Each structure stands twice: as structure tokens, then as C-alpha cells.
Image (cartoon, helix red, strand yellow):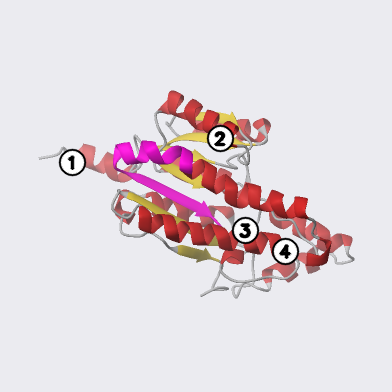
């Protein structure tokens, strides 16, 4: 019979012994997810473009939780960079069996003003980055017979918004990839899901607010415009998104795969 203390510890840290790789892990939703997975016991590799942001998040986690944290600056749109970073992470903490595809970009403006370079950059980060990172970790997950892939999409992957055509198209592609891959891996012990936040209190949302302010709105008016799409009348908080991600990574969530879960106060149903 298992020791009750050991069982209680397992319940408190259900991801102990798991290694999670998080893209865009230095700030915003990615940093909140990192904190949540550390709270659940996972060791972490945080990747992103800014080493200073990664350092700040890693230090915060090291101060609060007894997990191992590695950082690795990475451009997820470059295949060799992704391959080398995953190899580095595996060398530090073992092959990742949890992947959070969080890094993303959101170019805005009228469709007529979009040029092919902006379009390709959106797809390079938002879609090809998900493809490259997922492709790089799957062999390790298959060998372990267990894995969790969570793609941070957006409500823009479930519905449409004006002035962000490249973002909407790329996030729809992420949701489609999520569903297709979930079916391919359904018997491999690996789940693949998407979490689709509405406007969330992050640098990306602040960028949208700044654009509205530059167009003549006040800060309060700009925030109200973003929040009005949420039936709760507010911006989503990063830790609310992180809790949904953490739940999908739990061992007990094995039957949940191929889903695109909106965290948006009822905006999308």
C-alpha cells in the first residue's frame, strides 16, 4: 500500500518529474504559465527572444518553488534554432514531455496595408513556430508514452476580428493543427489542445491600447473598447489562462484532447 504522505505529495505536485518547455516564457501569459506549472511541480525550460525577461521569470520561480529552471533564448521561426534549443533543454532536464506553444505576434492594420513580409512573419511565428517546436519534442514524448502539447491560440482562432487578418488566419491555422495532431496522437498517450484567450492583460493588449490612444482615445476609453467584447466587461488576467493550461497538463486530463478552450468571459461559445 502506498504511503499516505507520498500520495499527498503526489497530489500536491502532480507534475513532479515532468519537464515543460514554454515558448515566450519570459512575460505575459508565458510567464504566468511557467509559474503555474512550477506550482504543480514541473521542471521548466523557458525560451524567448529576450534573455533578460527569461532571467526575471526564472529568478521569480527559483525564489518560490523547488523546481529546476533552465532558460534558452530562441527564435521559434528558425528551424535550426528550435532544434538546438530542444536539444539543449533535453540535455539539461531530460526530454520535454510538456510543450506550451505560447510565443506569438499580432500585426494590426487594414488588410490593404498588409504586405507579404508581415503576413509571412505572422505565420512564421504563430504557425511555423508551433510546427517546429512540436515536431522537435514528439520523439521524446513518444518514447515516454506520455505528453501534453498546449497551443496558446486566441479567440481569434475561433472567430474573426477586423484589422488583424494575418493574426486571425494564423490562429485559425493553429486551432486546425491542434485538432489534426490530436487525432494522430490519440493512442500515443499524448494530448494536444489549444487555449484561446480573449483580450488579456499583457504587453500585446497594451500595444492595442497604445494604438487606440495614438488614434485619439483616452487610456480609459481604449481599455473599455477592448473589454467590451468580453461579456464580463473586463480583460482576462494571465493567471486565469495559466490555470486552464495547467489543468490540461495534469495526468487526470488524459481524456481531453483536440479541444480549443476559450478563456474569454463568455465571448465565444
Figure quadrant of the N terminus: top left
Q: How far is mark 3 from mark 4, CA to CA? A: 10 Å
Residue 242 image position (x, y, % from top left): 50, 52
Q: How far is mark 2 from mark 4, CA to CA? A: 27 Å
Q: From the viewer's perspective, is 93 left or right of 218? A: left
Q: Earlier in the sequence, mark 3 or mark 4?
A: 4
Q: Which mark is residue 4?
A: 1
Q: How far is mark 1 from mark 2, CA to CA? A: 42 Å
| Closer-to-camera residue (116/211) | 116
Q: How far is mark 4 from mark 1, CA to CA? A: 53 Å
- Dot 4: element: loop
Query: How many neighbours does mark 1 have within 10 angstroms: few (below 14), some (14-19), or many (20 or more)?
Result: few
| Closer-to-camera residue (267/173) | 173
Of badges 1 and 2, the one in the foreground is 2
Highlighted magenta segment, given as a residue range: 135-153
Of badges 3 and 4, the one in the foreground is 3
Amino acid at each position: 500500500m502506498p504511503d499516505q504522505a507520498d500520495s499527498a505529495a503526489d497530489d500536491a505536485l502532480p507534475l513532479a518529474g515532468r519537464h515543460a518547455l514554454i515558448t515566450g516564457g519570459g512575460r505575459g501569459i508565458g510567464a504566468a504559465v511557467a509559474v503555474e506549472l512550477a506550482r504543480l511541480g514541473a521542471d521548466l525550460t523557458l525560451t524567448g527572444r529576450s534573455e533578460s525577461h527569461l532571467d526575471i521569470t526564472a529568478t521569480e520561480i527559483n525564489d518560490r518553488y523547488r523546481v529546476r529552471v533552465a532558460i534558452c533564448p530562441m527564435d521559434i521561426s528558425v528551424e535550426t534554432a528550435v532544434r538546438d534549443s530542444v536539444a539543449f533543454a533535453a540535455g539539461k532536464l531530460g526530454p520535454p514531455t510538456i510543450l506550451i506553444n505560447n510565443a506569438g505576434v499580432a500585426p494590426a492594420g487594414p488588410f490593404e496595408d498588409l504586405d507579404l513580409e508581415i503576413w509571412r512573419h505572422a505565420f512564421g511565428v504563430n504557425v511555423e513556430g508551433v510546427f517546429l517546436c512540436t515536431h522537435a519534442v514528439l520523439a521524446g514524448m513518444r518514447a515516454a508514452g506520455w505528453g501534453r502539447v498546449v497551443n496558446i491560440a486566441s479567440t481569434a482562432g475561433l472567430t474573426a476580428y477586423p484589422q488583424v487578418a494575418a493574426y486571425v488566419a494564423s490562429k485559425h491555422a493553429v486551432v486546425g493543427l491542434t485538432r489534426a495532431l490530436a487525432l494522430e496522437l490519440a493512442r500515443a498517450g499524448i494530448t494536444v489542445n489549444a487555449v484561446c484567450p480573449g483580450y488579456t492583460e499583457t504587453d500585446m493588449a497594451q500595444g492595442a491600447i497604445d494604438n487606440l490612444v495614438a488614434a485619439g482615445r483616452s487610456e480609459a476609453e481604449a481599455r473599455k473598447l477592448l473589454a467590451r467584447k468580453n461579456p464580463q466587461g473586463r480583460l482576462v488576467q494571465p493567471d486565469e489562462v495559466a490555470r486552464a493550461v495547467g489543468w490540461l497538463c495534469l495526468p487526470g486530463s488524459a481524456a481531453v484532447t483536440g479541444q480549443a478552450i476559450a478563456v474569454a468571459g463568455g465571448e465565444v461559445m
